[in-house]
Image: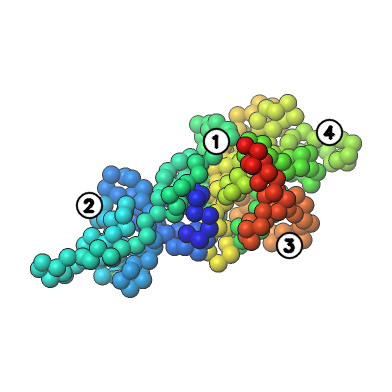
Amino acid sequence: MSIQSSQWWAVALAAEVTAAKPKGVSVDNEPIVLFRDQSGAIRALEDRCPHRRMPLSLGRVREDGLLQCGYHGWSFDGVTGQCKAIPNLLVGEKVPSTYGVFPYRAIEQNDFIYVAAGTALQALPPNLYASPKKIFSGRHTVGLAHAEFIAALMDGPQLLLDCAGIRISDTLIADPHLEDGWLVMERAAFWLGQTQFDGFVREYKLIFRLAINPETAESWLSFTHPDSSVVAVAHLAITPSTRGTTAILWRSFASTAAGVRSTLLRSAAALGRAPITVRAHIDMGAVARLLVGPSEHWQRDNREPGLYGTILTKERARL
Ligand code: FES
């Protein structure tokens, strides 16, 4: 994996990975195959057969838990990546120990499957909100590179998110700052149908809070009342995929907020609609016209930390 190998990257919804069929995913152009072995444990291997380079995700999971290539039947151990069986070997012939694929580490957490390539791994950050009983989830692939998606999320979240009955305003309440290791910023928000207002003189009814993991950009989004009571919450895993695209895995928590306006969110959930989702169709023209705002110091692609990175470095140096 070419991106930060000390990090876990979310690559699939847990429900998407079964023993019935391997699933191919990608992290920063690295093809990875996910599957469950005979014990139900999640496994992740390089999705490229060493024999003729076929994707192993086109193969099948054998009853003994090995992943078998669909082309000539070589079979691989999900933990070590070693080739364990080749059809039609001569009597006494053994599979060379050098035959194999790269094994990734894989874990299942928060309804997501995470993979990592390294061994000195950072712990997954804690949940920022408790999970209610009803959770919606899904995935989108967005035609924006990882850094561009994060920048757009910081500068114009309303262009990327579909929030039932709520509009996020352009007004920043809190500039990006660090809180317990999260890069946090807040914007004003209001209920759709609320009388139009001048942001300088009227009171906003809601606060949109965005908390970003500075290393991977995995994010928690919330709408709260000014008294801090929670109206709606969503969790996004934002992972670089292939050819400049970004995979977004999301969980949206059914709202339990009281109040007349919150009925919009509760009824949306009752009708099977997630309160907060990533837009299925993003207006890329509007994204291109976004003025650079809070994201101006966020830089990941070139490994130059920028202002926030500098702040991070300094803060960590003090610890
Ligand atoms: S390409 Fe996989 S076994 Fe031949």
Residue corresponding to mark 4: 203
Taking the spot 64% from the left edge, 42% from the top edge, the residue there is 317
Q: CA distance from mark 4 to mark 1?
A: 30 Å
> Which mark is first along the chain, 2 or 1?
2
Amino acid at pointer 1: Asn
Look at discs 4 and 2 and give the one toward the viewer. Answer: 2
Q: Is residue 12 left or right of residue 158?
A: left
Residue corresponding to mark 2: 64
Residue corresponding to mark 1: 127
Residue corresponding to mark 3: 288
Q: CA distance from mark 4 to mark 2?
A: 62 Å
Taking the spot 16% from the left edge, 70% from the top edge, the residue there is 88
Q: CA distance from mark 1 to mark 2?
A: 35 Å
The numbered mark at residue 79 is none
Residue at disc 2, secondary structure:
loop
Amino acid at pointer 4: Glu
* Crowdedness near tag 3: few (<14), some (14–19) or many (≥20) residues, C-alpha within 10 Å: few
